[in-house]
Image (tube, coloured by chain):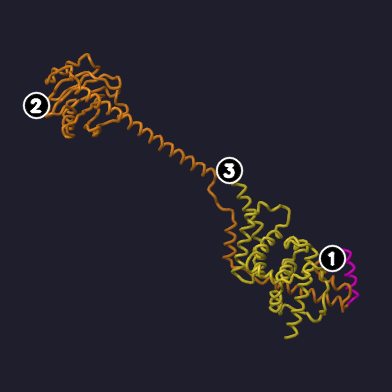
Amino acid sequence: MVDHWTPQLDTYLDGELSANETRELDAHLRTCPSCAADVLSRLQLKRTIHSAGQRYSSSPEFRERIRKSIAAKPRRSPVRMWLGATAAVALLLIAGLVTISVRQQQLQREHTFSELADLHVATLASANPVDVFSTDRHTVKPWFQGKIPFTFNLPELQNSEFTLVGGRITYLGQAPGAELIYQIRKHQISVFIFQDRAVGRDLGSGSLSLKDLSFNLQSWTKDGMRYFVIGDASNNDIRTLADMLKKVS
Amino acid sequence: MVYLKEVLEERLTASTFEELAMPLFDQLYNFAHWLAQDRTEAEDLVQETYAKALKGFSSFQPGTNFRAWMYRILRNTFLTSRTGLRASASMPLDAEDEMEISAGPETPESILIDQSQQQLLQTAIEALPVHFREALLLCEVEEMSYQEIAETLSIPIGTVMSRLSRARKALRESLQHKLART
């Protein structure tokens, strides 16, 4: 049997009727067995749908996967990130400075060697290559006395192919120094001696040799003096002369 | 410091979202499976729903219904899926928004059903057109109010009542038919 309340029964059970309508329907159900039975049947269906509807459950793995996908992701703390970034920048900066410094030193060295090569060539090209012309080291060395602010020793050349030609005053970077000319076979070699603090600050310490501008060169420091041996003689000859000088200096 | 603030806010958002969204997981999965009627599709649906919701969480208005918001995302995701498009295409559109609260011809005796007949009922629910099925499930399983269902499905309350009524009527008829055969 269908009465005017029938269409309202589901809404009533859903709890969506107004308070007044709910009260009225409550009263009606107490007096209408048919509607009461209908409500009971619908309530039964409603409960069954409720439990039947909870039908599917996911796997725990899937649930965990979703949870992980939305979880607040652990991130590196900003402080640590900043520290890392700062360290990286500092490292780059230091590397940059070191590179610049090394490059500057290299440029300075190249500049000095190029200047020495010029001095050597200029000396050989000069009409008067030496100011003191003597093969005797005991003549040449005293000649420099009072002309340069330091003294030096020259090697004994007996039993060697080298000959002392003479010496002259020279300047490198406005610092005075001695230039000695040696000869081996047809090659002339310049030996430059300066105070290291005056010329050697960017040349590094210790000895070095290089072949540049077609000249062979040996350079080293000893007791505050900077020595250069430069010439177009073979590297072996240059090194031999350098070794002889090292022994006596 | 702005960066630090953003990170903290982001983490706060993620943890708040997790706290709000994970308790809904089982219900959302169940609903998704009812809609898609396939485990893999249901998982894809839930996964996409959570991803979209997390992404759009900043646009969620605090104080409004989070549950309805999540169901709405899931349901819209489903409707744009292949299965969803197919399901909604088969939906009878006639008199969709028409109020139809007539209880139909069934009698109380004809649809008495108990817990032992759950399987029968589940098959009947599965057979419901998707728009009826979702309204019915939201009402009966999720126990949403009409207002909440209206928000979730983005339809007026009148349409919610209409769909619920038609869903129940279809369900009763289907059950009546099945019970008559047994």
The quadrant in which residue B28 appears is bottom right
The residue where tag 3 is placed is: B3
Q: Which chain did the image draw in orange?
A: A
- Distance from label 1 to label 2 (Cα)? 129 Å
For the image shown, how many numbered marks are present on the structure? Answer: 3
The residue where tag 2 is placed is: A158
Q: Is residue A239 left or right of residue B19?
A: left
The residue where tag 1 is placed is: A17
> Which residue is painted at 78% across and 79% down in the image?
B111
> Quick one: which residue is furthest to the top in this view?
A146
The quadrant in which residue B182 appears is bottom right
Q: Which chain did the image draw in yellow?
A: B
In this view, the residue in front, B80 or A79, is B80
Query: In the rendering, which numbered label is found on residue B4?
Result: none
Looking at the rendered structure, the kind of residue marked 2 is Gln
Question: Above or below — where is B78 with respect to A242?
Answer: below
Q: Which residues are magenta?
A: A19-32
Is A25 a magenta residue?
yes
Q: Residues within 10 Å of mark 2 (few under 14, many from 20)?
A: few
- Chain label for disc 1: A
- Distance from label 3 to label 2 (Cα)? 79 Å
Q: Main secondary structure of the magenta part?
A: helix
Tell me the element at label 2.
loop
> Which residue is painted at 79% across and 67% down in the image?
B97
- Chain label for disc 2: A
Residue A20, x across and y down, in percent: 89, 64
> Which residue is painted at 69% across and 74% down in the image?
B126
